[in-house]
Image (tube, helix red, strand yellow):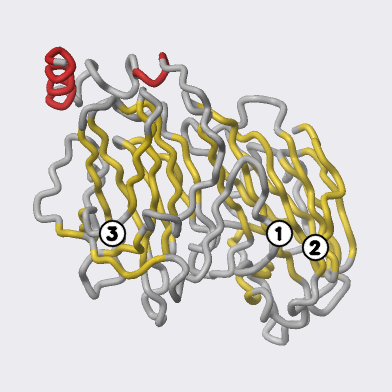
Amino acid sequence: MARLVVYSILCFLLAPLSLCSPTSGNHASHIHLTPRAQTPLDFSSSPASQWIWADTTNTVDPVGFRYQWLFSGKFLADAEIITTAFDTTEFYVNGALMTADNVRPRYASRACASFAINPVSNVFAILAGFNNATSAKTPAAIAKILLTFTDGSQQTIVTDSSWLAMPNPPATFAQTTFVPSGWTAAKTLGVVPNPPWDEVNSPNDTDSRISTFDRGGWIWTDAIPASGDIPAGQRAFRRTFAPALGQIPDTARIIIVADHSYQLWVNGVFIGSKQGFRTADTWDIVFTTQPVPEIVFAVLVDNNAGTAGLMMGSEINFKPVGPTNCVAGSFVNTEADADTPTWKSTKDTTIPANWQQIGFDDSNWAFVVKEGDYPEAQPWGADITIAAPTTTAISI
């Protein structure tokens, strides 16, 4: 016991050095625990996570949050995280980026941190941004962390007033060596499913939650005439998703619909097509070629005349990693928010060669614009049927 205490003290004091750093000789890489039953984490089950923010009226600056876990008699082997924010979030473990998303707070990200954890001391950090400072919406961030120790026991960490907060934190705020001088206790704002955050979907490894376009949006190029009457022709759309370090894409489920027709590619592989916007397709993708440095969703939409639009939702599940077979995942949607665009498109009917491929340079493409939220956006409304998966195990 004395040796264990001495070791833990040394690790805490020398965390910046190689003795106990998560990237050199991490204990987790030598641990073989019995994989736990994969029950998806959620924010509302006991103990419930709180939505948090800095105790300030300034909603323009991003807010940093920190929580430091210290050795309490057991060595840490693994950590699984779910997190989201209103509107954007980056989650770090000991300075390593676990996930970065801006798919709106209705869809959480789930990450595995076995490669980044330290057995005896860890800093969990969030950088959250709010892009609707002129609206009546409320900025907030939320997370839940499931810790698994080398003896198989577990502990849950939730976001609450025990986290420290600071608006506009320095770039080094997520590092283990950073001293949060002047930081204050995070302000708690409520729990899921209290309004205005009445629902959050979390990805998991057994069942895709992407089964509705709820809180998604219709998008089009940034060249929409004032009349809304879009000329006939094809437009190309791209969205590149880069998995965070340690998150290995395994499968993806995609739901997609377009006015008037679409063709879909993933990483340059043709997936399928359909005409009409009353029935959406569901596609299941399997990534058999590893590694997958990025995922490129490419959609060619053909508009007859008049209204035109694209709406897509996808859930990406990552391979189980770490000693507990931790599972993780992220969502990529056509965002119903013009303030945080991630999709790009061509402005006219000139479609360049190889635009569907990984590595294509779309830096001169314009970001898309929001046409409307589902299900309110007209003329499409809520009358869209989502079909069962028509294709499974497409190898990318």
Q: Position of residue 371 (x, y in %)?
A: 65, 75
Q: Using residue 78 as the reference point, say whether residue 204 is left or right of it.
A: right
* Amino acid type of the residue that numbered disc 2 sits on in the rendered structure: Ile
Front tag of 3 and 1: 1
**Does the residue at mark 2 contact the one at mark 1 (Cβ under 8 Å)?**
yes
* Residue furthest to the left: 181
Count residues near mark 2 (Cα–Cα under 10 Å), then give few for <14, some for 14-19, many for 20+: some
* Amino acid type of the residue that numbered disc 1 sits on in the rendered structure: Ser
Front tag of 3 and 2: 2
Q: Position of residue 237 (x, y in %)?
A: 70, 56
On the image, numbered disc 3 is attached to which residue? 63
Q: Using residue 244 as the reference point, say whether residue 358 is left or right of it.
A: right
Count residues near mark 3 (Cα–Cα under 10 Å), then give few for <14, some for 14-19, many for 20+: many
* Residue furthest to the bottom: 227
* Amino acid type of the residue that numbered disc 3 sits on in the rendered structure: Val
79 or 72, nearer to the observer: 72
Which numbered circle lies on residue 386? 2
35 or 230, nearer to the observer: 35
Q: Nearer the N terminus, badge 3 or badge 1?
A: 3
Marks 3/2: CA–CA distance? 38 Å
Q: Position of residue 353 (x, y in %)?
A: 77, 44
Marks 3/1: CA–CA distance? 32 Å
Q: Nearer the N terminus, badge 3 or badge 2?
A: 3
Q: Residue at x 27, y 27 (%)?
A: 74
* Secondary structure of residue under mark 1: loop
For the C terminus, the image quarter is top right
How many numbered callouts? 3
On the image, numbered disc 1 is attached to which residue? 211
